[in-house]
Image (cartoon, rainbow, N blue to C red):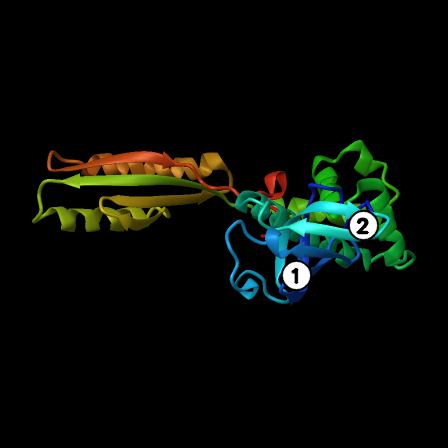
Amino acid sequence: MQSNKFPKPSQLVIVQVTKITKLGGYCRLLEYDNLEAFLPIREVSSGWIKNIHEFLHQGQQIVCKVILFDKDKNTIDISLKRVTPADSKEKMGAYNLEKRFKTLFIQKSKSVKDEKPEQLEDTVRSEFGTYTNLISNAIRNTEEFKNSKLPKLIKDTIINEIEENKKKKRYVVSYLLITSTTNTSKGVSELKSLFSSIKTTGVDIRYISAPKYRMRSEGKDFMDAENKIKQVVELIKSKQTKDLTFEVEKEKLKRDKESLLDYMFK
């Protein structure tokens, strides 16, 4: 859902390919009431294109950048090659998140019998612009959310949904275990024994590539998850010998681009 009727130049948009020709692809802008745009073949890829069908498929959803908008002629040109993989991932993630929040809102709005769905959607659009912004304000319980004209029943159910998902949230920490042994005959059996002991603590350990293993722990909060790892580290220290040594280092987990909303509706 977009508050503006038309996209702006250089803006990233989600499009669906509807028709492919030798000169390019015709697309629908999914966030703008299915406005049509044209993707010229020169804007599909930086390299030489022998067969455009190797790059575009009918029905495909992709992220493009608006490069031309002629309001008088009502024509929009877009580019695929000017969108970086990181920008594409971020934009698609935000788009999918918006769809999920819209679905949530529609489900909750069914409980309000005296309000039409169209009127409720107009209220969201005028006050928050997007459903994602609505949920973001609800999470922070802002004055904008408190003073919203949305029915109290909907606001209460959204808050309750947020609180329930907070309770379900599991926090994950990850560490790398690096092993080293000079005793080839007993080293393998000692490691197997150690790994069996680690699994009894509730910490998951998996082989990556010699000599690295990944240890993951879940908890109700990060401190809870970290404490489980600390117990494992103490266990590892007790098994360390002059022939069998270990190193443990924290691994930085990659996070999805859903920022403060990443715990919602997984």
| Relative height, residue 7 to residue 23 (above, below) | above
View extreme (right): residue: 114
Percent of width and height locating residue 180: 17, 39
Q: Which residue sits at x=75%, y=42%?
A: 8
Neighbour class for label 1 at 10 Å: few (<14), some, many (≥20)? many
Question: Within the image, what quadrant is residue 245 found in?
Answer: top left
- State whether residue 230 appears in this view: no
Of 208 and 242, the residue lying toward us = 208
Q: CA distance from mark 2 to mark 1?
A: 42 Å
Q: Which residue sits at x=86%, y=57%?
A: 117
Residue that carries the numbered disc 2 in the rendered image: 154
Percent of width and height locating residue 91: 63, 46
Q: Which residue sits at x=26%, y=38%?
A: 235
Residue that carries the numbered disc 1 in the rendered image: 25
Mark positioned earlier in the residue sequence (2 or 1): 1
Q: Which residue sits at x=51%, y=55%?
A: 48
